Image (spheres, rainbow, N blue to C red):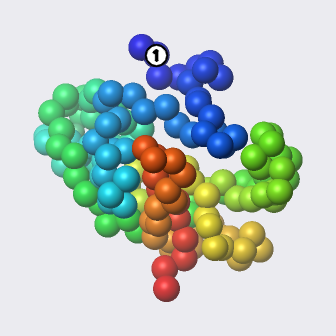
Amino acid sequence: MTKFGSPQSMTEYDGRFVPVIYAEEQPFWKAAREHRLVLQSCDRCHRAWYPIGPNCPRCLSTDFTWQELRGTGKVSSFVVFHKPWADWLRDRVPYVVAQVELDEGPRLTANLPGVAIEDVRIGMPVSVVFEDVSPEISLPQFTVPE
Ligand SMILES: [Zn+2]
């Protein structure tokens, strides 16, 4: 089963594109459903990694443990989308897609709910929140900590 590529790698739920959950990603999505952020952490070099995969991108070890992360980090990059690429987005533009570098190192791509576009800055501290989008999927998103 290939993980990347065709538009068929996404499904729609209420008109919103949501991730397809692959077997190796089950612990990540199960934890997200419980509003916990977990990633694979290497048993040899003790670093967390993302995207989810069979071995550590740093030392290539295949031994890992699912580790709960703090859920804090900073915006390392972002873009503002002005065009609604799907009907679900028609009344939601413009919106931000950010890359967040977690304190533990891995970078996740997410939206920044509750953050005004004009307030988004590279390096701004953010913390994870979970958006329940379907019975199976809660998306890790990021917002400014209170
Ligand atoms: Zn490693």
**In-front residue for pair 21/100:** 21
Query: In x, y percent, where is residue 58?
Result: 30, 37
Give x and y (percent) for residue 19: 52, 37
Q: Amino acid at mark 1?
A: Thr
Numbered disc 1: secondary structure: loop
The quadrant of the picture showing ligand 1 is top left
Q: Which residue is mark 1?
A: 2
In this rendering, position of residue 75 left or right of residue 80:
left
Taking 67 as reference, is 144 above or below it?
Answer: below
Numbered label tally = 1
> Dot 1: few (<14), some (14–19), or many (≥20) neighbours within 10 Å?
few
Q: Nearer the viewer, residue 71 or 28?
A: 28
Q: Is residue 78 visible?
A: yes
Q: Is residue 64 above or below residue 91?
A: above
What residue is shown at x 64% (from left), y 73% (from top)?
A: 114
85 with respect to 32 (left or right): right
Q: Residue furthest bottom?
A: 146
Based on the displayed image, in which of its 4 quarters is residue 94 positioned? bottom right
- Residue at 78% across, 40% down: 86
**Spot occupied by residue 98 in the image (x, y as percentages of width and height):** 62, 56
Residue found 42% across the figure and 14% down from its top: 1
Above/below status of 100 relative to 83: below
Residue drawn at point x = 56 percent, y = 24 percent: 9
Residue 60: horizontal and vertical position, in percent?
25, 29
Q: State whether residue 57 appears in this view.
A: no
